[in-house]
Amino acid sequence: MRNFRITVSYDGSRYQGWQRIGNGQSIQGKIEAVLSEMTGHKVEIHGAGRTDAGVHARRYVANFKADCRIPLDRLPLALGAQLPEDIAVQVPDDFDARFDCTKKEYAYYVYPSKMRDPFLTDRAYRYSYPLDAERMQKGAQFFVGKHDFNAVRSVGTPVKSTVRTIFWCEVDQNNDGLIRIRVCGDGFLYNMVRAISGTLLYVGSGKFEPEDVARILESCDREEAGPT
């Protein structure tokens, strides 16, 4: 049995998330089915973490063990020939996706406009009011560091602690007006980054001051923060 690390890119529009749950469509389930057929035995993949339904990934890391005779440099081609068009795989080596992971980054995209843009559908959240990206960047810095993030999480899977470390939280805007919110941490609570993004939207629209983020975190009260 060899240990394989795979780096997966996928469009999550049709899936319930990375993880296999019941009979729903999942990235994990699709790749496991192809690998099991290729190797002739059941293959289980371990991913770096769960994702919500509809989330896309540029570089999602997972690993699996298999008795696979296909040369390593040809494995991505063999997988790609059988996977659907919205999932792609690259294959480095010697890795454990859960235990070797040191940082995870989410990027959320926001398009402040009253008009729909068909090229951004399912790629960016359309916000119908003007946003000040500089205010959002100032507010974002209060999320950086080791904090109790209970104020920006939804009730979901039970956790031992709501303390996490955010390495960076950055907001930028390109020439077309698309705003990107990047949050990198050692781990995230359920809906944590979505709630951070919603809070920063309120900062950018003037409903919150940038400095309010510190007060919101200290409150540990989900009602104080912005929407998910």
Image (spheres, rainbow, N blue to C red):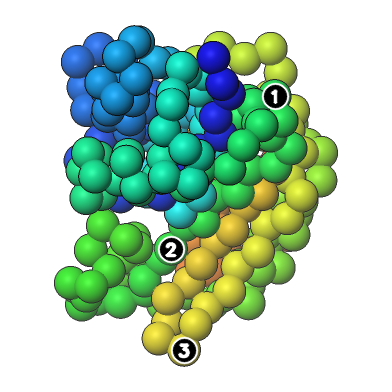
In the image, 104: left or right of 22? right
In the drawing, does residue 43 fall left or right of residue 101?
Answer: left
User: Where's residue 156, x and y in %?
Assistant: 47, 19
**Rendering coords of residue 209 (x, y %):** 65, 64
Question: In what element is the residue under mark 1?
Answer: loop
Please state which amino acid type lies under the numbered disc 1. Answer: Phe
The residue lying at 49 percent from left, 61 percent from top is 201
Up the image or down, 111 lies above or below 62; here it is below
- Amino acid bearing label 3: Asn
- The amino acid type, in three-letter code, at marker 2 is Tyr
Circle 3 crowding by C-alpha within 10 Å: few under 14, some 14–19, many from 20? few
- Neighbor class of circle 1 (other Cα within 10 Å; few <14, some 14-19, many 20+) is few
Residue pointed to by mark 1? 99
Q: Residue at x 54, y 14 (%)?
A: 1
| Disc 2 element | strand
Q: Is residue 153 visible?
A: no
**Mark seen at residue 175:** 3
Which of the numbered marks, if any, corresponds to residue 143?
none
Task: Note whether 122 is above or below 32 in the view shown.
Answer: below
Question: 10 Å neighbourhood of mark 2: few (<14), some, or many (≥20)?
Answer: some
Q: Which quadrant holds residue 5?
A: top right
- The residue at the point 72 percent across, 50 percent down is 143
Residue 111 percent across, percent down from the top left: 36, 71
Tell which circle, 1 or 2, labels the residue nearer the N-terminal end.
Answer: 1
For residue 208, side relative to residue 35 (left or right): right
With respect to residue 131, does 154 lie above or below? above
Give the labeled residue for mark 2.
Answer: 109
Cα distance in 3D space between marks 1 and 3: 39 Å
> Is 27 in front, or is 31?
31
The span from disc 2 to disc 3 (Cα, nearest Å) is 14 Å
